[in-house]
Image (cartoon, rainbow, N blue to C red):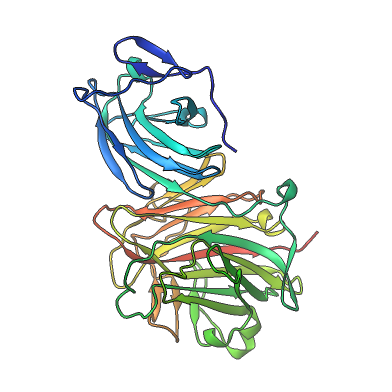
Amino acid sequence: MCRRWIGVFFFVLIAAGVASAQDAPPVPTPNDDLTIAPIAFDQIVADTITEMAIYDWWQISLQADDVIVVDMQAFEGLSPLIGILAPDNELVARSDADRIPEPNSLALIQYRTEAAGLFTIVATRDGNQSGTTTGVYQLVTRKINLIPERQNDLLPIEFRCEDKVATNALMLAFQDEISDAPPAGSAYRESYRLSIYGQSDFAPLILADADLVKTGRLDCDNDAGAVLGNTYTLPGEERITITEAEQSHAAQLTLQNSSLEDQFGQVRFTLGSLNAGTGRYLVVVEGLVLQNANDVDTLILRPGPLASQIPLTVYVVGGNPGRLDLKLLAFTKDNTVVAECDDAGRGACADVPAFIGMGATFLQGDTPSILGDRFDAGVHLPAGSTDPIMIDISSGDTGTHGRYTVFIVGELPANK
């Protein structure tokens, strides 16, 4: 939930000293050495904070109850700071409330609008006029629709799909951009395939729905016929092949759309285990694409009440063959960053085993295998909450883009 910050000092009147949050920030003139420009959702912009121009204005039209997330990554020593101005120029949110700005760090802010209008995202530096840092930054604004929260923010332990009842393990959601033409080699503008493999007594059930489909629910399935013969391998474990004997521990569901008019919008999957079966599980989501080098996708995860007792591990793997260099940033709904990674097994995610050579092979479909390499990213997500966790997926190298696959490893423990 976003806070309203009133009575704090944030922006600088270049000619008149410091202005309070209730005062209107300065209106740039053509002679000012700063940027004032529109920004679109998912558009990455870059600019510079200097001693002559200590802030930039990025303007965007929002509707009531829109939820936006703004990322500002700083370089060359800049300590980044973001503010959001309402249409009346009142400061309604700022990024340093939850994360202290540091040189070359990431500023992150989430805000839910109360009314429609033209909002301004102000990119500046820690300390504003009294600050000393300068440098280059990249900024992106995304619109997210959280998985709907139920009364008292409680998720059901079980969910029903036709005549089947499953224990809730995980809800996940995403919204991918689609192009005017289908990808090369495909008749579909949107094509997503989700597979889930269980161990021990975990017997998967998949429920899918989407925002923009007139019929509401898209499908539900626990059929494993399509995955017989597939294999999967996780770090430190032996390869597992899905045989007829293991058929009750696997399921797959494919969503395909050939029409721009009937696009899915946000897609949501609810995953569970039949008959309260417990054990580890692996989720594989195919069909996602970074459309260009500056694209940012957001995956939303929400573990079920029992499954939330166990940490989740998430990997993103670039399409084969290729050298798509992927990067992950995971944060909670109050903007707390819980994990970030460029290359699994190194740097900020050295505790996450590398995914080199790991992944899955498929007997059906146009992708025979998805195997990790040193450019793939992975994060451990903490246990203890059913609140949504947002994961930003982007390119760690601004020269790469393309298709990628998400691997999620979790566990459904026994109900004690």
Q: Residue at x 24, y 23 (%)?
A: 29
Q: Residue at x 39, y 34 (%)?
A: 121
Residue closer to the observer: 156 or 113: 113
User: Total label count?
Assistant: 0
Q: Is residue 149 visible?
A: yes
Q: Is residue 104 visible?
A: no
Q: Quadrant of the N terminus?
A: top right
Q: Residue at x 36, y 17 (%)?
A: 12
Spot occupied by residue 57 in the image (x, y as percentages of width and height): 33, 31
Considering every residue shown, the one lying at the far bottom of the view is 244
Spot occupied by residue 235 in the image (x, y as percentages of width and height): 48, 66
Residue 75's place in the image compared with 412, above or below, is above
Considering every residue shown, the one lying at the far top of the view is 16
Spot occupied by residue 298 in the image (x, y as percentages of width and height): 46, 54
Residue 151's place in the image compared with 318, above or below, is above
Q: Quadrant of the C terminus?
A: bottom right
Spot occupied by residue 411 in the image (x, y as percentages of width and height): 64, 63
Residue 5's place in the image compared with 65, above or below, is above
Considering every residue shown, the one lying at the far right of the view is 416
Residue 23 position by quadrant: top left
Residue closer to the observer: 162 or 402: 162
Residue closer to the observer: 77 or 256: 256
Q: Residue at x 53, y 25 (%)?
A: 5
